Image: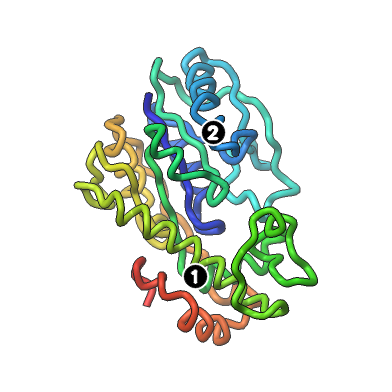
Amino acid sequence: MRRFAIAGIPRSGTSLAAKMITEQVPDAYCVNEVDYLDSKRIPALMNIVALRLSKGMPVRNRYGEDGKIESDVVRNLRRHKIEAREAPGSYSDDPVVGIKGNTALDVELLLRRGFKILFLVRDPRFTLASWAEAGRTPWRDVTEDNLSQWWRYHPFPWEAGPDNAIGRRVEVWQAFAEEILHYTTMFPGEGTRTAPHPDDRCLLWTYEQLTADPNGFLRAFAIWFGLDMPAVVAGLENRNREDRFESNFAELDMVVDSMAPARIGFGYE
């Protein structure tokens, strides 16, 4: 059984990574937040996905308007479809199967069940700018007058005031980042980011690394699971450009510098 989960910070390239793995890595498939977010049920459900893949049967996933696996779930929320389709390529009797679920996943439980965890993070300034503009999500709706139902069931120890949207979003980013640093420190691994050891439990990439070196990412994933090398893909656009967002980056810089120290652990000074 070869299983993995993508548990990065939302809006950090996790859907893009899931799409790349499914479309480019031989004998690997990733389900993108479809029906399987109860972590206790995920191992059994992934076994079903693996069986369906090995038999050439359709598997439910998210597809964009172009008919391909969706790479930006939040921005294209109203335009993509969840459908059961035959997966690209052919699969062995024991395919590498995973799920992208970000912060909804119980990482500790999945690690105990033998899953490997792929973490992705992104420059917090651009993550926060994306949260502010990507539609209704728990990460955007954090003020008392516009509080997502998510926080009513997952209480958060807010320190920023009830109307301080940017401050509260930074607190959420910091909490997610601390959790990732916890697991990547607990399971440091014997390999490197680009050449992980097969026994490594966790693998960390940043969005910036992913877009700068997509082929390195795909090779690293294949090495991690002992799979054949994927075909070379074209370069990716890094969307970390201030002109793409309406956010005040001077304000974001100030708040991130003072409230998100975990960024330094990922190389964001």
Q: Is residue 207 left or right of residue 245?
A: left
Q: Nearer the viewer, residue 268 or 157?
A: 157
The tag on residue 240 is none
On the rendered image, what quadrant is the C terminus found in? bottom left
Callout 1: SS: helix
Residue 111: name its quadrant. Answer: top left
Residue, disc 1: 124
Q: Position of residue 45 (x, y in %)?
A: 55, 26
Of the two numbered discs 2 and 1 on the same chain, state the one appearing first in sequence: 2
Residue, disc 2: 40
Callout 2: SS: loop
Q: Residue at x 49, y 28 (%)?
A: 43
- Three-letter code, disc 2: Lys
Q: Position of residue 51 (x, y in %)?
A: 49, 17
Q: Is residue 105 left or right of residue 248?
A: left
On the rendered image, what quadrant is the N terminus found in? top left
Total numbered labels placed on residues in the image? 2
